[in-house]
Image (spheres, grey):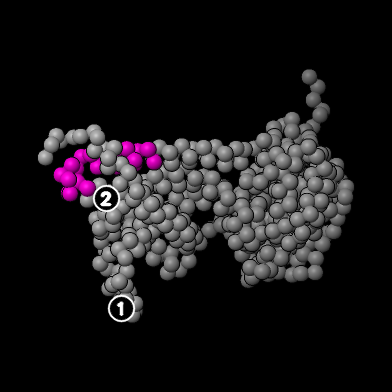
Amino acid sequence: MIELRNVHKAFGQNEVLKGINLKVNKGEVAVILGPSGSGKTTLLRCINFLETADDGELIIGDSKVNFRNAARKEILAVRRRTAMVFQNYNLFNNMNALENVMEGLVTGRKFPIEKAREIASQALDKVGLKDKYNAYPLQLSGGQQQRVGIARAIALNPDVILFDEPTSALDPELVGEVLAVMQAVAKEGITMIVVTHEMSFAMDIAQHIIFMDGGNIVEEGTPKEIFTNPKENRTKQFLERILPRWNYTI
Amino acid sequence: MGSLFDIRLVFEYFPTIISRFHITLLIVVVAIGVGLLLGLFIALARMYKIPILNQLSIVYVSFIRGTPLIVQLFIIYYGFPLLLDEIGIDVTQWEKLYFVLIAYGLNNAAFMSEIIRSAISSVAVGQHEAAYSVGLSRWQTLRRIILPQAFLTAFPVFGTRVVTTFESTSLAFTLGILDMIGQAQAIGSRTYHELEGYVVLAIIFIAVSMILEKIFIYAEKRLILNRR
């Protein structure tokens, strides 16, 4: 279980998160929706301290961290319980696919190399890249790079994987392969918090939808509740704009 | 005094002059070695804004880059013994070569630090973030992800720096070091045939520079392959 309590974050005068409270259960796939600038990505990045929130608490498993005075050791501990998949993949350019996946295990968690190689190759097999162990990031397509990114995250066996718009930088025809892998990861019961604009993923895969606007969580619930019966006007407005309505007659 | 330029003397002087090549080589190797280590240290002090060290580094780098090498050589040669004498170390018996090595090392450190610093900051922010996200510490990130990538970026400039350092060793003779230049001078003043010695020097310097450049271009190709 992962819980955020009263998370505040400002960049200078610009208050991006205005007291976020959020609970995501173990094994749950949570999708954060919202217009750009609503604080979705910042919230996600606060969870693994890529941004340091100004105030609030993070509870992950049995450990509790205060954002205001988190020690470097605590931050590292949180990072070793989480993993992230980035919009721009951010694979290590100086390493091939297998080394990319092994790095967090060998250097971060001190796994023996053989053990790490075994875990890493299983992870790469899972994302369908059995034949790309030795490929460097620049030799891979965007979709393949992102699948390595996902393998890198699942290999760490984290409490939660954070997905920051994982398909936004991809060519439209490569989005499918990445979504399919994410769906497979979801089926394994790994806790996922996903910031995305892929409504089909939110509707079909997620169990928990969080709608954010202006640094607040406006509304949350199951996909059914949010998509078919939103309570807040702001949510309705957003969904109307973003969901295709196939009732045109031409 | 015979003719002003005698081609036979070029061949005659060549072995004598190149026999001092190891001194030049020593200066280059020490300068690059010290430069890399101290330069990395300075670059990190500046990147992570370590108090006091950061300010010292800024002053140091702008001093070295703002003064001619020959001035630095003489300041080290005359100033360093005084400084060390203050803390009770007597270096009056040191060979001149040591001062030359120190001066070239310190000089190179300033230039190297700037090369390293710009190479490190050219590595995308996302690389740091990805490393942190898989649970690497700041030092592990630097060592495993950032420095290897920065190294590839810095390599071509580094190669140029090595060639420049090699050329700049030609000032060491001003402290009376008997390197290749010193040898050519000695021959010149003994025989009044100055030009031949310098022609030999020109040939040696251009040959070595070209070889170095070729080596670096080849190494660069081999290193980079698909990694960038």
Circle 1 packing at 10 Å, graded few (<14), some (14-19), many (20+), is few
Residue tagged 1: B86
Residue B198 lies within the magenta run: yes
Q: Secondary structure at mark 1?
A: helix
Q: Is residue A156 visible?
A: yes
> Measuring 35% from the left and 57% from the top, which residue is drawn there?
B104
- Look at discs 1 and 2 and give the one toward the viewer: 2
Chain identity of mark 2 = B
Residue A111 lies within the magenta run: no
Asked whether, in this view, residue B61 is left or right of residue A156, the answer is left
Q: Nearer the viewer, residue B92 or A230?
A: B92
Q: Is residue A20 visible?
A: no
Q: Nearer the viewer, residue B222 or A22?
A: B222
Q: Quadrant of residue B74?
A: bottom left
Q: Where is residue B222? Give x, y as percent.
A: 57, 39
> Measuring 24% from the left and 55% from the top, which residue is drawn there?
B174
Q: Quadrant of the N terminus of chain A?
A: bottom right
Q: Where is residue B116? Give x, y as percent.
A: 47, 52
Q: Where is residue B8? Give x, y as percent.
A: 24, 35
Q: Which mark is residue B183?
A: 2
Distance from the alpha carbon under mark 1 to that under mark 2: 35 Å
**Residue interval drawn in magenta:** B187-208
Query: Do callouts 1 and 2 point to residues on the same chain?
Result: yes
